[in-house]
Image: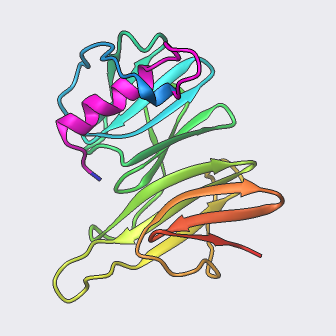
Amino acid sequence: MNFSPWLQFAFFTALAAGFSVAGEHPTSNWTKRAPLPTGEDITAISHVEGLTVVATSEPKVLTSSDLATFEAIPTGLPGGFTDIAFSGGKWFASGQHIYRSTALASWELILEAENEDVEFEHVFAEGSFLFATFTERSYPGRPSPNQRLFRSSDAGDSWDEMAGAPPARDYHDLLFAKGKYFLAGAGTPLGNG
């Protein structure tokens, strides 16, 4: 997923926006915080334990502890990430494959795509589980890509495909609430019971 420079600007402005006027919603006021050390597309963001980590379309992540200054950290991988999540003291990122890292500068391949026509678009950390969505790229003759959902209960050491997941063109988010998982896909929220 690529975002225009304007959307990147708006995103980081929203990220840094505060409650400047009592009673207003935090997105009512927008302020640009700092120039970013990158011109790449921003693909995902996560904020954990005082550290903000931004995934980009290039082989680097951006980090900030104050949302005013950002440091670019090369990943050492051939491509960028499509999503990033944190669970159990480790970072997980999706892209052509699923990767795991403890320090953001070195990444370990933990789930490999079947071929170059597929890509892991999202990685979610929810409770003691990790979830990853897998998409076959669209092209003429296959306009609706096949979306699949995988789950790991051991920090990415092993993965199982969730064969009972409802079909969707794209899974966007996953939430565990009230004892059930809710999967947002193709514009429709889906629950598991």
Q: Can I make out residue 133 in this image?
A: yes
**Residue sitting farthest toward the right:** 179
Q: Please, which colouring scheme is shown?
A: rainbow
Name which residue lies at 40% across and 65% down. Answer: 113
Name which residue lies at 17% across and 29% down. Answer: 39
Residue 69: % across, % down:
35, 10
Residue nearest the viewer, comparing 85 with 115: 85
Name which residue lies at 43% across and 61% down. Answer: 112
Residue 182 covered by magenta stretch? no
Please state the extent of the stretch shown in magenta in the rendering.
2-25
Name which residue lies at 71% across and 63% down. Answer: 181
Q: Can I make out residue 159 in this image?
A: no
The vertical placement of 66 against 73, above or below, is above
Which image quadrant: the C terminus? bottom right
Name the image quarter holding residue 40: top left
Q: How many marks?
A: 0
